[in-house]
Amino acid sequence: MRLYIGVDDTDSIDSETGTGKLARWFEGELPPGFRLWGVVRQQLLVHPDIPYTSHNSSACIVVEASGRCTAEDVAQLAAGHVRRHAQEGSDPGLAVVPADHPGLERIVSFGYECTRRVVGRKDALRAAGDAYLRGLGGTEDGIIGALAAVGLTASGWSGRFIEFGRLRDFPDSITVGALAEADILTVSLDRDGRVPVMENVVRTNGWLRPRLFGHRAVLPVLPGEDGSWVSQGGRRNKKPLSP
């Protein structure tokens, strides 16, 4: 069983613990028989009518389950985790949806809507149907981004991984083959169609964040020097985006 666990609006502008970090920490809460597949950051619409902390992003924890715990059991664990780590003044929301939920297609559509227009809590509750969706404090506006994170991640074609295996432990320079062993596919964006081969080196500049493309982790790269490749994307600070 695969579970999508969406979280949003758990932090404040001055906090050291963002929603992404809170989501990654949940791996330590998983019961026996459950395995973290990955944590995916999703970017939602930035608009003057939408309150957000820094970039209006949310996170989805993807879990593979083979134990006896039910989705409801995991939802209760996740709710406790969010309540313990959400920052004062935040408006946290939590969504937990199995991959075989009959309403998942509707939730995927809702996720895409959240990247294009302003939506409200009622829209989120309507899209969730009988799926687990809870506000855990404040205005409870976090349910919007939490459900959107589930929908976008379940689509298989949106977001970037902030946790996948031990990607944070990889060196700044790593071979295409080593990435393949970690189930990360290296894909060239070169206009001339050059293709990375297993012995080629990828330079990450200390920031390796594959994208979620085709329901798998994909690292886009461009040619660098001396036959190496350079991963795309980079760090940015918590300074809010201009609406």
Image (cartoon, rainbow, N blue to C red):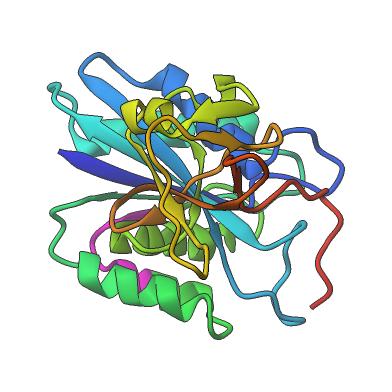
Q: Is residue 4 left or right of residue 117?
A: left
Which residue is rendered at x = 76% and y = 40% of the image? 88
**As rendered, which of 192 and 233 lies closer to the eye?**
192
Name the spot of residue 230 as percent of width and height, x first: 62, 45
Residue that extends furthest to the top in the rendered view of this protein: 32
Name the quadrant containing residue 3. Answer: top left
Question: What count of labels does the image hold?
Answer: 0
Residue 182 on image: x %, y %: 36, 28
**In the depicted structure, whether residue 199 falls above or below residue 86:** above
Which of the 4 image quadrants contains residue 165? top left
- Residue in the image at 81% along x and 38% along y: 15
- The stretch in magenta equals 125-133
Comparing 240 with 192, the one in front is: 192
- Asked if residue 141 is among those painted magenta in the image, a careful observer would answer no
| Residue 219 x, y percent position in the rendering | 47, 47
Query: Which residue is drawn at the image coordinates 42% and 53% (left, top)?
Result: 187
